[in-house]
Image (cartoon, rainbow, N blue to C red):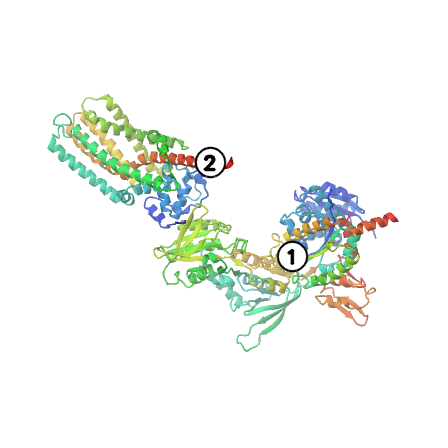
Amino acid sequence: MTFEPKIVGFLCNWCSYTGADLAGTSRIHYAANVRIIRVMCSARIDPTFVLKALHDGADGVLICGCHPGDCHYSEGNYKMMRRYPLLKALLADYGIEKDRVRLEWVSASEGQRFADIVNDMTERVRALGPSSIKTALATDMAER
Amino acid sequence: MEDLKIGVYVCNCGTNIAKVVDCDATIESASRLPGVAIARPYKYMCSNPGQEMIVADIREHGLNRVVVAACSPRMHEPTFRKALQQAGVNPYFLEMANIREQCSWVHEDGAVATEKAKALVKAAVLRVARHEPLERRSVDMCPDLLVIGGGIAGMTAALDLADAGSKIYLVERADHLGGNLARVDLTAPYLDSARDMLTDRMTRVVEHPNISLLLNSEVERLEGFVGNFQATIATKARNGNAADQVATVDVGSVVVCTGYKEFDASRITHYGYGKLPNVITSFEFEKMLREGGVETKEGKAPQYVAIIHCVGSRNLEFHAYCSRVCCMTALKYAHEVKSAVPGAYVSDIYIDMHAFGKGHEDFYRRSSEVKTLFLMYAKDDYPVIRRADAKDDCEMLIEVNESLSGETIEIPADMVILMVGMEARDDWADVAHLVNISGDKDGWFIESHPKLDPVATTTDGIYIAGACQAPKDIPDSVAQARAAAARILGRIAKGKLEIDAVFAEVDEDKCSGCRMCNELCPYTAIEFDAEKKRSHIISALCKACGACVAACPSGAIAARHFTDAQIFAQIEGVLA
Amino acid sequence: MAIRANPKLIEELETYGAQDVSKCYHCGNCSATCPFSQDPYILPRRSMRSLQMGLERKLEGDLEPWLCYYCGECSQECPRDAEPGETMMSLRRWLTSRYDFTGISKLFYRSWRIELAAILLVAMLTGLGFFLFGLSQGNIHHYDGVNAFLPGEKIHFFDWGLAIVLLVLLLTNCARMWWFTIGRDKSKRVPLTAYIKSAYLLPMHFMTQMRYAKCERKRPWVIHLILMLSYVTMLILIMFFVKRMAAGPAIDWRVHAFGLAATVGLLGTTIFAVRGRIKKTENHYKHSHETDWMFLILLIVVAGTGILQFILHRSGLDMAANITYVVHLMSVVPMLGLEVPFSKWSHLAYRPLAMYFAEIKAEAARAEARASQGVRAPQAA
């Protein structure tokens, strides 16, 4: 059986969540691996959310916000944009492959783009296999 | 705290959800989750019986939390919140699981979709257990308005609102009212004059005591929130030396009616626009009509007039959408040419005849009765215009691969009218940014809901009307303008307006006074209490983006309804 | 190569009786209802389209108008009242004038006054000619015998003379029809065998009008067939048995039985048609061109005077019979001389020819298909 990765998606309410809804109203089919959690703005996405998701068994985390310049709150997405490299550096230190966490801009009119991103990310994470944190935690548990 | 009693409702949405997601299995899995007291499916949860079912269950079983697994919360969250409120439960004790737009409509495999639906329901159940009761805030609603754009839509909205007693600031960039409609001669399908329609309205706008008309003006800045915006308007000085006048006004709502611009016909090289003197655009032809004579550049009455539809519209290279008004306008030209030059032959070269509106089909019929030659061409298979030879009795020849006959024909023309489509104004993105709304891929402003709320936008208090939302004819623009006016009047009538209870709060015990959050807030809603050395959030200004929450090193700021605990619960749920 | 469209053609066709052609928006209801609309002939939509666009040369070469019998179902089904049936009729008139090299047909169809004047002129000249001829030859008080006013054998000569002139005119027109519809299309080569193989179709369609029987309603076909057979019977009687017909006063049943039957057929059907056109009982009677009326009136006068002179002669009223005979000839000569080559009677020739040509074209297409298959076969092997 092929490995079906679990991916948590954090989407901002105004652009990306609406874009994901548009993919639905447009009946664009895409992989079922991403489970979406709505936040008001990508700036709300605390790095601990990502860590929590990876810890709880996610094989990947997708973060989506408005395109630069389009933020409903003027510049929330820039805050996420600045936070993201720090987060990536931290994850690299933990030995988490860079393809497991991804930041993308999806506007309210980009249903197709959202579907394409989900499909692409699912394939990449599937190629990486299950997250090493998951196996490490499992070994850890077994050793205890 | 009392025991959790969660009710879970899974909507079939007719077959929209049920044909992909196994709703019974989803119910079964939800019923085993902690705190779930009741789990039920229903055909249409948003219907009255569906809502009444929730109300009855709350009253009968003492439910204190509700999860509705149905469509997107962007669609029906307010509906179900009202149901909770009706049953006497705090409306924020609701959580929705989006199993339609983000599940049944995007997945084909029933088993996979059902698993995903179960996870989304579990996340909602875990989250709702951590919801807190919230109270909506009430703020004053300023009855004054800002209308941007003085075309038919803007004037209509302004007049309706001004008649009802509101003070209107009508801002128009040009030095006159009327917008694109002021460039039009007669209107389809009844051939009545655009000038007559406009003159009456323009006079009323200018004379109306409640309308403050600002010509040669642009909105420079818009701040605040619904009911309480501050708009900065710059008016160009009449003479070059004087400084521009800048004024700031308080308004409660904004109606954006910035209209459209016409497609640049020279972008399609096949038509020779700009090179062949008698190939003109529909707006150039309108000008000719308004000035009273149909004649070629050489001053002759044209014997053959050809009209080409869909110039810039309905093709992949330029705009895929239909511009909606050109078909009827083209038919109007057939009548106008025939009445200006009685012996003229009119060819109407079209892709499909879109005669959808009231009286349009009949107008189409009447246009064929005046002997218009209709020629059909296929999308993206442009007719080609060339200069005729000396022996021909015409100026130009148009080669068309005519679909109805399957023949390639050449049609004579002395004048060619290009039906240029509508496109978003070049500065649509600036306007969108100014009022904090968004545009679609073509630059048309996005409405709150394409069918159920085509007047409001995603930003509360900002409304759109007319062709800035999508290509529209006069009746549709007017209808949308009046709908916007009615929506705004409804809110003004209430005097106060309730705004979302979602905002951020600082826990003063945890705050270290580092002031990191102070600079982050785009609304300057965070002030620093120098005495207490603590930051404090002005709730009326906060729009709940959560930027400060994520940034606070002490974890002292909580985003109401989006707390860390709630989101963590959701993460656990989706990963189950 | 693009074909030059001519938006003015539709106006030319209006002088031939076309109306409302530009109302058609090509929904195709007409073709769906037409029993003759079968590949490659799309009736009547294709003709409507060619006419709207003014594709003159293409229309000239079309057989479609002749394959239509004007049952009128198309006009009834048309959601825009574009009258496709009447358009086909007007195209037949237009084609008749195109096939006719003299230009007379064109004059007649476009001006009923000219046609009427021509008929009256020919009638007067005929009347005058035969009257003087009769006076110079015989006695107005004698219908037959030695002193006959208009002796049968002389009339017989005249018959044949007229027949030869008409035949020459009609054959030239038919040749032009062939040239327009088959001959000048250099892209299609028609094998000689196709002409021979399908030749039987000509007399078959001419005699039976069997194609008309395919229309949903059968009555128009029966009426048309009776008219046709009566006409042909009468033609044979006149051309070959005119002496026996005129002989008397005893009735010669060998010829007169046929003559009487044909007269009943001609009068019955024409009266039916006149009544229909006045009351607009049938779809194809709704629109009447002036030439339709002239044709019917001439036919009634011909048949009426024919039978009248027969009765008068048998009643011993020789002088009255002679005068009626002159009047009969005054209507027969314009009817044959003008209607056969230049107007409605020419349909007699063009319709069977069209069916013959259609079959020849189909045969040529089949031959071409076989040939191209033959070329492909070795490659496949």
Asked if residue B368 is positioned above or below residue C318 in the image, the reply reads below
SS type, badge 1: loop
Q: Nearer the viewer, residue B284 or C61?
A: C61
Quick check: can you spot residue C339?
no
Q: Nearer the viewer, residue C113 or C153?
A: C153
**Proximity of marks 1 and 2: CB atoms separated by less than 8 Å:** no
Q: Amino acid at mark 1?
A: Ser
Instruction: Indicate the quadrant where residue B158 lies.
Output: bottom right
Identify which residue is drawn at 25% across, 28% down: C236
Residue C373 image label = 2
- C354 horizontally vs B144: left or right: left
Nearer the observer: mark 1 or 2; the answer is 2
Asked if residue C174 is positioned above or below residue B380 in the image, the reply reads above
Q: Nearer the viewer, residue A25 or B369?
A: A25
Q: CA distance from mark 1 to mark 2?
A: 57 Å
Residue linked to disc 1: A107
Q: Nearer the viewer, residue C366 or B2?
A: C366
Farthest residue, direction right: A144
- Where residue A5 appears, x then y in whole percent? 74, 48
Same-chain status of marks 1 and 2: no
- B133 horizontally vs B431: left or right: right
Q: Chain of mark 2?
A: C
- Where residue C121 appears, x then y in whole percent? 20, 41
Please rate how many residues cluster around mark 1, counting C-alpha atoms within 10 Å: few if below 14, some from 14 to 19, many from 20.
many
Quick check: can you spot residue B199?
yes
Q: Chain of mark 1?
A: A
> How many numbered marks, from 0 up?
2
